[in-house]
Image (cartoon, rainbow, N blue to C red):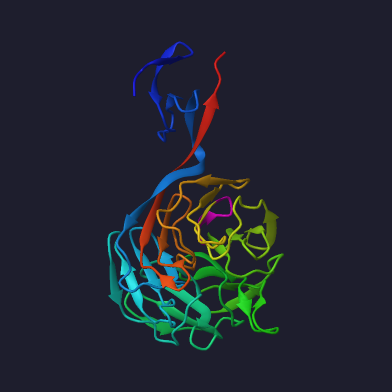
């Protein structure tokens, strides 16, 4: 690094990689261009390794944040009721779920106030509409959701305000893709407008009134945006996959990562409301790195557990930390 370039008569520092400090102007020696950093835009960040789950598994419920997370259920195999709490460094086993062991659940909330809904019992393949509420210490049976299903998307930052959408149910022969949306108000579930395209093993995130649904892989390569009333089709991601992880602030700021392309992938993409942009890969390629609507967003997310090869579960945890910025190429005049 050296002040070896001038931009519009002013000396600027020379870097071989893009920078992240808002307001900074510099010369990128790798691309041979002057660049500036503005606030807002694609989440430019990195994944870093953290403490692993005590029990390796896949398709568990993931809620909370990178400093206060919750992971429940999942497939070891078979389905599990194990719950673990995350403090930003390590996972600790806490009280198990009380209903039937299951995985591929929906859910949302925080480390101390979360909802787990539906899912499947791995040993039988029976789909569920059981709901449990977590108070930071124990799980309590709640009001069932309307349609028994598994492997869909969830969004919500609070225990009393979230939605679940898509997945697979048993209305047809075998497993049938689902397009239903249900909203939770803290005491009951209400069916709302459906997704435009039914799909399972989707990624999602956001809030009860502003959310994302990302599909891919061998399902329809289509993404949708939720405005609190209806779903609208949006741009496709760059790499189609299913069983990916997702985290979103709302329907204009989100992240999808990992998944099954096939094979498993570590690719991460950020959504800015208009386009998907590939950003830094995860450290370990995997699928099903936690399901549910974690309370992070495009600048803060967890990737937990998952499958790294057929039949091979992992407990690995990775944290995504990013700044919502734009790096613009500048021209001199």
Q: Is residue 83 left or right of residue 243?
A: left
Q: Residue furthest top?
A: 9
**Is 141 covered by the magenta stretch?**
no
Whether residue 282 is situated above or below residue 28 in the rendered picture: below
Q: Residue at x 57, y 60 (%)?
A: 261
In terms of image quadrants, where is residue 138? bottom left
The boundaries of the magenta stretch are: 245-253
Whether residue 71 is situated above or below residue 271 in the rendered picture: below
Q: Main secondary structure of the magenta part?
A: strand
The x and y percentages for residue 332 are 54, 16
Q: Is residue 6 left or right of residue 256?
A: left
Report the label total.
0
The x and y percentages for residue 281 are 46, 50
Q: Quadrant of the N terminus?
A: top left
Residue 187 visible in the current orientation: no
The x and y percentages for residue 56 are 36, 72
Q: Quadrant of the C terminus?
A: top right
Whether residue 18 is situated above or below residue 55 in the rendered picture: above
Q: Residue at x 68, y 63 (%)?
A: 220
Residue 149 visible in the current orientation: yes
Q: Is residue 142 left or right of residue 90?
A: right
Q: Nearer the viewer, residue 7 or 249?
A: 7
Q: Residue at x 33, y 74 (%)?
A: 55
Q: Residue at x 61, y 70 (%)?
A: 200
């Amino acid at each position: 690094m050296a002040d070896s370039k001038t931009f519009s008569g002013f000396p600027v520092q020379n870097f071989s990689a893009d920078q992240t400090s808002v307001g900074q102007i510099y010369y990128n020696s790798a691309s041979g261009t002057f660049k500036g950093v503005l606030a807002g835009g694609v989440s430019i960040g990195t994944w870093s390794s953290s403490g692993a789950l005590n029990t390796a598994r896949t398709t568990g419920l993931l809620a909370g944040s990178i400093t206060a997370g919750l992971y429940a259920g999942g497939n070891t195999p078979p389905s599990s009721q194990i719950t673990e709490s995350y403090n930003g460094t390590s996972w600790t086993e806490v009280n198990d779920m009380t209903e039937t062991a299951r995985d591929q659940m929906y859910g949302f909330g925080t480390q101390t106030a979360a909802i787990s809904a539906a899912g499947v019992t791995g040993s039988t393949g029976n789909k569920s509409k059981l709901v449990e509420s977590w108070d930071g210490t124990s799980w309590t049976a709640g009001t069932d959701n309307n349609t028994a299903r598994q492997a869909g998307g969830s969004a919500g930052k609070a225990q009393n305000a979230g939605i679940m959408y898509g997945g697979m149910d048993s209305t047809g022969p075998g497993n049938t893709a689902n397009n239903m949306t249900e909203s939770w108000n803290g005491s009951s579930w209400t069916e709302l407008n459906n997704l435009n395209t039914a799909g399972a093993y989707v990624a999602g995130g956001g809030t009860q009134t502003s959310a994302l649904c990302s599909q891919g892989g061998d399902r329809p390569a289509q993404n949708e945006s939720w405005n609190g009333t209806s779903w609208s089709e949006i741009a496709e991601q760059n790499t189609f996959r299913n069983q990916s992880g997702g985290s979103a602030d709302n329907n204009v700021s989100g992240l999808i990562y990992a998944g099954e392309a096939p094979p498993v992938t570590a690719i991460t993409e950020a959504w800015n409301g208009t386009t998907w942009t590939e950003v830094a890969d995860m450290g370990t390629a995997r699928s099903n790195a936690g399901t549910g609507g974690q309370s992070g967003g495009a600048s803060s997310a967890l990737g937990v557990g998952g499958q790294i090869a057929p039949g091979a579960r992992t407990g690995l945890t990775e944290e995504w930390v990013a700044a919502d910025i734009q790096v613009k190429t500048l021209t001199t005049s």
